[in-house]
Image (cartoon, rainbow, N blue to C red):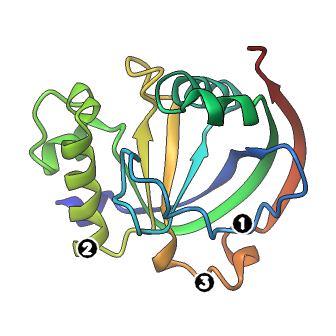
Amino acid sequence: MLQDLIEPWSGEAYRHLPDGNYDVYDFSYTGLAANNRWNVQGEQTLYLAGSVDVAAGEWSRHFQFDRSQQLAAKTKRRKVYQMMVNLNHTLNLCDRLCWQELSLKDAPKCFLDKNIARATAQFIRQTTRVEAIFVPSMVFLDQMDKWVLVIFLEKLPIDQPLEFLPKVEDYGYFNVEI
């Protein structure tokens, strides 16, 4: 049963933002993109990487495939933050048992189709108490330990982010030369 796979989780994850004076707790941009894999435009969704290599790989993939040349010129450097995360209800879409409970065929490869990824996330978001899902990194699709944490912000007190993101530390920077 899917409900049996919902678990609390605490651990470290990584977020990167443009270099500059940005507030890591500012979630105002989290629902603006029209091309996210795990949410539709308008849904405030925070994406955190499970490791620095996943964060770098995912940013590089988006930088390469999803950014216009004009925007790419403005995003050469990203500031990386290491965040402590505390969540009460998570679901792991990197787990075969979860794929079976959701009747997903050809997982995790099926998540390459944004429509399937979004539909899966929508089902979980709308029918369960899950606050976040662990999803396979599209960069490391054959390595289920290389995950992205997709947080459904409407299910959390975003006006009090320290409740679910209690600690943030500067980690460093990513740089891209064009």
User: What's the mark number on residue 118?
Assistant: none
Q: Amino acid at mark 3?
A: Pro
User: Which residue in the rendered view is the most extreme toward the front?
Assistant: 70
Q: Residues within 10 Å of mark 3 (few under 14, many from 20)?
A: few
Q: Write down the residue under mark 1.
A: 165
Q: Amino acid at mark 2?
A: Gln
Q: Is residue 63 left or right of residue 117?
A: right
Q: Amino acid at mark 1?
A: Leu
Asked if residue 55 is positioned above or below residue 37 in the image, the reply reads above
Where residue 126 sits, quadrant-wise, is bottom left
Ranked by sequence position, the earlier of labels 3 and 2 is: 2
Ranked by sequence position, the earlier of labels 2 and 1 is: 2
Q: Is residue 46 left or right of residue 127?
A: right
Where residue 131 sits, quadrant-wise, is bottom left
> Which residue shows up at 10% across the image and 33% down it?
105
Distance from disc 3 to disc 1, alpha carbons, whole Å, reads 11 Å
User: What's the mark number on residue 157?
Assistant: 3
Where residue 114 sits, quadrant-wise, is top left
Q: Give percent across and percent down for residue 69.
A: 60, 26
Q: Residues within 10 Å of mark 1 (few under 14, many from 20)?
A: some
Asked if residue 113 is positioned above or below residue 57 in the image, the reply reads below
Q: Give percent across and percent down for residue 129.
A: 35, 75
* Secondary structure of residue under mark 2: helix
Q: Give percent across and percent down for residue 88.
A: 52, 71
> Which residue shows up at 48% across the image and 32% down it?
66
Q: Is residue 87 left or right of residue 38?
A: right
Q: Quadrant of the C terminus?
A: top right
User: What's the mark number on residue 126?
Assistant: 2
